[in-house]
Image (cartoon, rainbow, N blue to C red):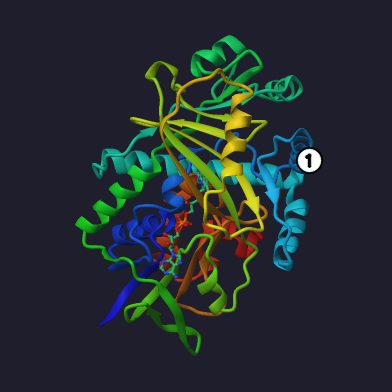
Amino acid sequence: MKRDVVVVGGGCIGLMSAYCLHKSGREVTVIEKNDITDGTSFGNAGLLSAFKKAPLSAPGVILDTLKLMAKGESPASVHPTFDLHLYKWLLKFAASATESRLKRTLALFERYGQISLDMYESMVKDDGMDFHFCKDGLLMIYTEQNTFDAKAKLCTNPDAYEILSKERTKEYMPILNEKVIGSILLKENGHVDPGEFMLELKKYLESNGVEFLLNEEVQRLEFEGSKVSKIRTSKGSYEAETFVLSTGADDTLAKQAKNKFMMTPAKGYSVTFKMKDELKPKTSSLFADLFIAMTPRRHTVRMTSKLELGTTNPEVVRKQIDSIHKNLGMYTNKFDMEEQVEWTGFRPLTPNDIPIIGFDEKYKNLVHATGLGWLGITFAPAIGKIIGDVITKDGKNETNEDVLLFSAFYQG
Ligand SMILES: Cc1cc2nc3c(=O)[nH]c(=O)nc-3n(C[C@H](O)[C@H](O)[C@H](O)COP(=O)(O)OP(=O)(O)OC[C@H]3O[C@@H](n4cnc5c(N)ncnc54)[C@H](O)[C@@H]3O)c2cc1C
């Protein structure tokens, strides 16, 4: 039996692509090598942070990182490696961090961030999905006076920003100590519980007829002329009209189609724990100078940090977890973190924060949906919509405005 659309990879990008394709009347099969209960789309911070938040490839980021490295507080590190691809990636990252690119990227982030926020809202209200979703801003906490003053000076629009003193900041996050300088609330942002979102989305898709083939790894793509003729998995083989590759940081299958994407796995960590309700952060918060996020959830709080390049080790490394606790401890009073769950995952990171989306350049029925880096949850609904549209309405990249604007195939 030839299937209609097969989506390979059941992370947030694969499931949102399946959702939008299903809404457009297509028959969808999702093939996932695990069971959609864990992974990068589950353990992340859940920030929906498209508004007024500088991309990773922002001017000055390299200097700021080097300063933190000198202080021993850097969240970012590069493991020594013989992988030339990573060095090319780093060069491209440095070259992308320009003022003109920054403006353009921020505008794109707002465009696709708004589409995503509206879609999250509709999934809760119209589809009846029950996941923790809040549109109550992102609190950027500053620990350096100079950085805070420089940022605060630029925050002139009261609809988008609220500048908070040290005392007001402590009302938002009661665990903070005297070393914190102040904060800026980026009002348009929000947050979700990514695990709840993923499970609710899967439940919705299953009950609406989307087929799930779990614990089945796609091992090989087979080609005939300019098409993917079938895929071979650990359990069998499948033909389909269209194949979507949404395998996150794992580019093994994309390489079989002769793609060498400018993307690298960027390892990060989270620790999820229980704490006293009165001490919980009132909204999602990010220590701007330290790259540590804290997100309140229904029953727990999640802390995330670290961006390690040049490693594919899937283990939780104790030294990294200890370093997150140490960095946080410098700016907080002692508090109890109960029932801690430590986790690690890999961001599919491109050097300029632009994802890899759209039809493959060689194979007419192959579509890529990856490269969302540190913003996959923020943009998953919008990316799903773009993938749905390019497959069902356009049939090619050149007539889809969003692919032209927001895909590394055109803006790399
Ligand atoms: C520490 C950390 C914090 C983060 N915080 C945020 C945040 O606050 N906000 C935000 O927007 N984003 C955040 N992110 C980024 C976000 O989690 C990712 O961008 C997003 O999860 C990527 O989704 P994906 O679907 O592309 O990849 P994944 O979630 O990795 O999904 C890919 C799936 O493909 C499957 N797969 C791979 N190969 C095969 C195969 N051959 N056959 C079958 N299945 C296969 C994998 O098992 C996996 O389930 C964070 C990431 C990390 C690591």
Counting from the top left corner in percent of width and height, residue 246 is at: 46, 63
Query: Residue 365 vs residue 312: left or right?
Result: left
Left or right: 208 with respect to 189?
left
Q: Residue at x 54, y 39 (%)?
A: 50
Any part of residue 275 in sight:
yes
Q: Callout 1, which amino acid?
A: Leu
- State the residue in front, 313 or 402: 313
Binning the other alpha carbons within 10 Å of mark 1 as few (below 14), some (14 to 19) or many (20 upward) gives: some
Which quadrant is home to the C terminus? bottom right
Q: Residue at x 64, y 24 (%)?
A: 330
Residue 112: x and y in percent read: 51, 46
Q: Residue at x 76, y 37 (%)?
A: 64
Total label count? 1
Specify the quadrant of the image occupied by residue 65: top right
Q: Is residue 394 visible?
A: no
Q: Residue furthest front?
A: 318
Q: Note whether 122 is above or below 138 in the view shown.
A: below
Above or below 279: residue 410 = below
Looking at the picture, how far across and down is residue 134, in whole percent? Answer: 39, 31
Q: Residue furthest bottom?
A: 225
Residue identifier under label 1: 66
In depth, the one of 356 and 85 nearer the eye is: 85
* Secondary structure found at label 1: helix
Residue 376 or 269: which is nearer the viewer? 269
Position in image of residue 345 (x %, y %): 51, 52
Is the CB of the residue bearing disc 1 within 8 angstroms of ligand 1?
no
The quadrant in which residue 34 appears is bottom left
Quadrant location, the N terminus: bottom left
